[in-house]
Amino acid sequence: MGIMDKMRKHMGLVMIILILAFMVTIVFNWGSGGFEAFGKNRDVVGVVNGEKISIQSFYQSYNNALEQYRNAGIKVDARTSEAILQQTWETVVSQTLWNQQIEKMNIKVSDEELYYYLEANPPEFLQTQEAFMTDGAFDYGKYMNALRNPQGNEWIEIERYLRENVLPYQKLNDIIVSSVVVDEAEVLQAFTDQSVIYSAEYIEAPVHLLPDSIFEVFEEDLLENYEANKDELYKKDQSRDIRYVYWLKVPSSEDTAATLYNLEDIAFRHEEGEDFNELANIFSELSDDKTTGELGWFNLKDIRREYKDAVSSAKKGDVLEPILIDNEYHLLKVNDTKRTTEGREVNISLIIRTIDPLNTYDYFATEAEAFTLDYESYGFDKALQNVDAQFDTLKGNFSKEYPYFGALGYFPALAKWAYRSEVGDLSTVYENENAFVVAQLIAIVEESYIPFEDVKPSLERSVIASLKTEKAHKLLKEAHNTFVNDKKTLEDIAKGNEYLQYNSLSSTINDLPYPYGSSPVFADVLRQLSIDKTSNPFETGRYGSAFVHLTARSAIDEELYNQQYDELKQALLEEKQMDAYEAWMEELRNNAVIKDYRVEFGLN
């Protein structure tokens, strides 16, 4: 039963690692019929160690992931769908690599392992089945009775899925993390960092105290820095210039008129005797009863500001003119009014109708298609004259990694098109949340270097920053020598130099004061110091330099340590297991031959 104990031990980590892969697996393996179904390269979106990933199976995985997001109530806009698209690729590649490793290591699942898993981990979808419920709750006894006494082949599909798509991954994961251990010294260190109080005083030389004016920068130093960092910092990638016509997705006056006409009809029906709140239940486009219908009593000073002017002069029974808020019209009725010691109060009811721009959007889409047809016959400029659209030119300033297009907003599909097209190409009609657009690629600008003169100011800042770091460390070494040789106090030494600061602390390692809470060097120095000892000067990253004198350190609470030992050890173990998995996965990817053809399908 050794494998069972390991499975139980790592179950939480396994589920974290595999949950996304399992989401894809069902579609990836069951929905596409396998890789062999597609033999032509034009159907292949990628290859992993010689194993093909078909575009059909990739899209099925992507659409399945989109559906998962929508079912969770997450709005899928252009940014989210792009992130899901990229995550789908990473997941499918990882899934393929895992499958290859499982096959390479000949990992199989025994009947004993399968039964143990079903016994210890009732599948979630079975826990909601009526046959296993008692008084609305999952009944483990009923479940086990069915597991131990099968009536036919009802378990075959469940067993097959677990045997092929769950347990092999858990066994492989056990192999990956089997060498991970946490010793007592690591647990003690973690406990010490969160509970032991260090009291210390220190001198620091923050670089921000050093003025730029005390440093002299020479032209040759700037040129030398420029040449040394030219490829890394000042190289401009190949870019694209486009011109495009676009139709912003804003409701037209006709959309607004249609919504107002609809509200007029509702108000007329109320005048004819229909109950306003019943009309709200029928026609309001928000289902929340607290949002529409009768809203109750409000003091005028507390009422929504958009309502205040109209309501303040209204009488009991008045139906007010529709109020436009964002893309909604709010139709209010004043049911009653009264005066209290707090001022005038009103009881109101509300109907909300959203401006429906679908007809306008359909018109924009048609106009965009018409532009592409006119372009074929008359060229870009003439086609632009024939449509009611906006026009713009964008020279560079966007990339596949930064796909922003001014008024169009985030538009990854347009950026991808631009980077796979040739000069003169016209795009199809693209659409995102903000607009419809048709673009033409007008230039490909080859990679180049930003001229020295253009980056000279930033180079000066960079060189001065390096000089400040050197100066700060030199000041700290001088202050340290003074402390050691002249026996002055740290506070007195700092007072004698405007570029030094004296500070003290009393905190745990995990709660060090800013900016040293993120400085592993500062924490290590404190850990290694003995009481009443002083460190050597050390650099603290981009903040400057410091040295520390430890004055006290609280004792370790042995009783509390023993109480928290198991919890700390488990947390450290899970962290190290995750690190081990990530390192293994990175090595697997680095050693794999992965061919990415997504660009041929406009996916990258």
Image: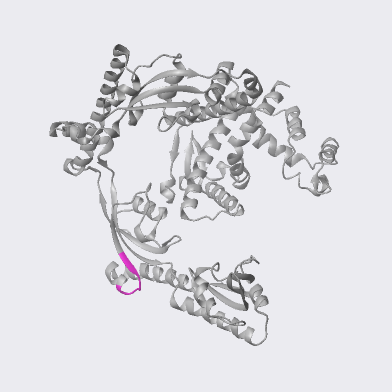
Say if 184 sits above or below 72 in the image. Answer: above
Q: Is residue 355 visible?
A: no
For residue 285, side relative to residue 528 (left or right) = right
Q: Is residue 255 left or right of residue 34?
A: left
Quick one: 486 or 360, which is closer to the camera? 486
Q: Quadrant of residue 371?
A: bottom left
Taking the spot 76% from the left edge, 27% from the top edge, the residue there is 112
Q: Residue at x 75, y 44 (%)?
A: 126
99 in the magenta segment: no
Q: Is residue 148 above or below residue 425?
A: above
Q: Nearer the viewer, residue 51 or 420?
A: 420
At which x and y percent is residue 47?
A: 48, 38
Question: Is residue 6 visible from the viewing direction of this image?
Answer: yes
The residue drawn where x is 31% and y is 60% is: 440
| Residue 535 image position (x, y, % from top left) | 38, 16
Classify residue 453 as left or right of residue 97: left
Q: Is residue 19 left or right of residue 256?
A: right
* x 50%, y 44%: residue: 87
Quadrant in the rendering for residue 487: top left
Q: Residue furthest left?
A: 219
State how many labels appear: 0
The image quadrant where one finds the N terminus is top right
- Start and end of the magenta stretch? 385-391
How has the structure been colored for display?
one colour
Residue 72: horizontal and vertical position, in percent?
61, 52
Percent x, y for residue 157? 73, 41
Farthest residue to the top: give it: 485
List the single residue furthest toward the bottom: 272
Task: Classify residue 96 by image quadrant.
Answer: top right
Vertical comparison of 245 with 446: above or below:
below
